[in-house]
Amino acid sequence: MSPAFSSWSAFFMMGGYAFYVWLAVACTLIPLLGLVLHTVLLRRRLLAEIRQRQAREQRMRTAQAKKRALQQAGEQG
């Protein structure tokens, strides 16, 4: 098996079609990288919202338990 290009320079020139080849590569990789970045940021935001919601629910449960304890103490006293 022989290599398709004789040197790195020939590889980057792509037989005279370098502009079109590298433009196509860029037009493929840039949206893919954007999609990966968007997904990572969306995941972080979603996890932060879930943590906030869980903390809020925990605070609500704690407040309700205190309220019930106060009501029970008032009924007994």
Image (cartoon, rainbow, N blue to C red):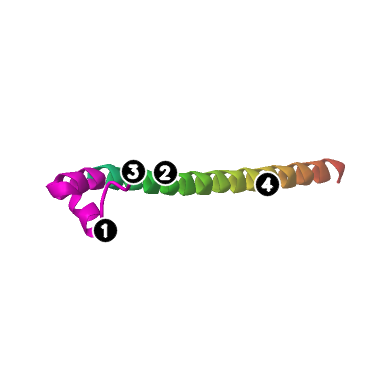
SS class of the residue under badge 2?
Answer: helix
The N terminus lies in quadrant = top left
**Distance (Cα) linking label 2 and label 3:** 11 Å
Q: Main secondary structure of the magenta part?
A: helix
Q: Viewer-nearest of labels 1 and 3?
A: 1
Q: Mark 3 = which residue? A: 32
Mark 3 is surrounded, within 10 Å at the Cα level, by few (under 14), some (14 to 19) or many (20 or more) other residues, namely few
Mark 2 is surrounded, within 10 Å at the Cα level, by few (under 14), some (14 to 19) or many (20 or more) other residues, namely few
Query: Is residue 61 part of the magenta span, yes or no?
Result: no
**Distance (Cα) linking label 2 and label 4:** 36 Å
Q: Mark 1 = which residue? A: 8
Q: Amino acid at mark 4?
A: Ala
Q: Mark 2 = which residue? A: 39
Q: Nearer the viewer, residue 7 or 73?
A: 7
Horizontal side, residue 17 vs residue 59: left or right:
left
Q: Which tag, 2 or 4, sits closer to the chain's start?
A: 2
Q: Amino acid at mark 1?
A: Trp
Q: Mark 4 = which residue? A: 63
SS class of the residue under badge 4?
Answer: helix
Give the farthest residue toward the front: 1
Query: Is residue 8 part of the magenta span, yes or no?
Result: yes
Residue 35 on image: x %, y %: 35, 43
Horizontal side, residue 11 vs residue 41: left or right:
left
Residue 45 on image: x %, y %: 46, 47
Mark 1 is surrounded, within 10 Å at the Cα level, by few (under 14), some (14 to 19) or many (20 or more) other residues, namely few
**Distance (Cα) linking label 1 and label 3:** 26 Å
Q: Viewer-nearest of labels 2 and 4?
A: 2
